[in-house]
Image (spheres, rainbow, N blue to C red):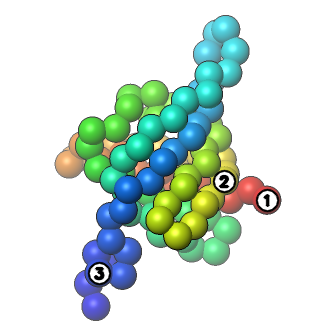
Amino acid sequence: MHDDAVNPFQRVKIDYLQDTLLGVNPLSCECMAKVVQAGASVSLQILAPWPEQLLKAHTVSIKGESCTYHGIVVDASKNDASELLLNIELQG
């Protein structure tokens, strides 16, 4: 079975924290993402457009169609298709 059929893109709300020189900024966005859980981590493949600040987020809360995840961003990168790839270590 094709991976897109198992884990289709879905609308998610992402609440995230970003460190600045003046403190921590709480931010939020809604976007289309593929969410894949593997043990104690979650991977997100986020379709463009996505907020540039999300690339520097350190803590996230993801609310999808059927699950909510909370964790720490351990890796964030852009791929050749301008999608954002996040790897998150789940907390609590």
Extreme-top residue of the structure: 22
Please give left or right for residue 85 compared with residue 82 in the image: right
For the point 60% across and 44% down, the residue is: 60
Residue under pointer 2: 70
Q: Is any atom of residue 63 visible in this view?
A: yes
Tell me how far mark 2 sits from mark 1, CA to CA. 7 Å
For the point 32% across and 64% down, the residue is: 9
- Say what amino acid the circle numbered 3 marks: Ala
Q: Quadrant of residue 11?
A: bottom left
Q: Is 28 in front, or is 54? A: 28
Label 2 or label 1, whichever comes before in sequence order? 2
User: In which quadrant will I find the N terminus?
Assistant: bottom left
What x and y, as percent, mark residue 52?
Answer: 38, 29
Label 3 or label 1, whichever comes before in sequence order? 3
Tell me how far mark 2 sits from mark 3, CA to CA. 25 Å
Q: Which mark is residue 5?
A: 3
* Residues tagged 2 and 1 counted as in contact (Cβ below 8 A): yes
Please give left or right for residue 57 compared with residue 52 in the image: right
Label 1 Cα crowd, 10 Å radius (few <14 / some 14-19 / many 20+):
few
For the point 29% across and 50% down, the residue is: 47
- Say what amino acid the circle numbered 1 marks: Gly
Q: Is 62 in front, or is 3? A: 62
Q: Which mark is residue 92?
A: 1
- Say what amino acid the circle numbered 2 marks: His
What x and y, as percent, mark residue 21?
Answer: 64, 10
For the point 33% across and 71% down, the residue is: 8
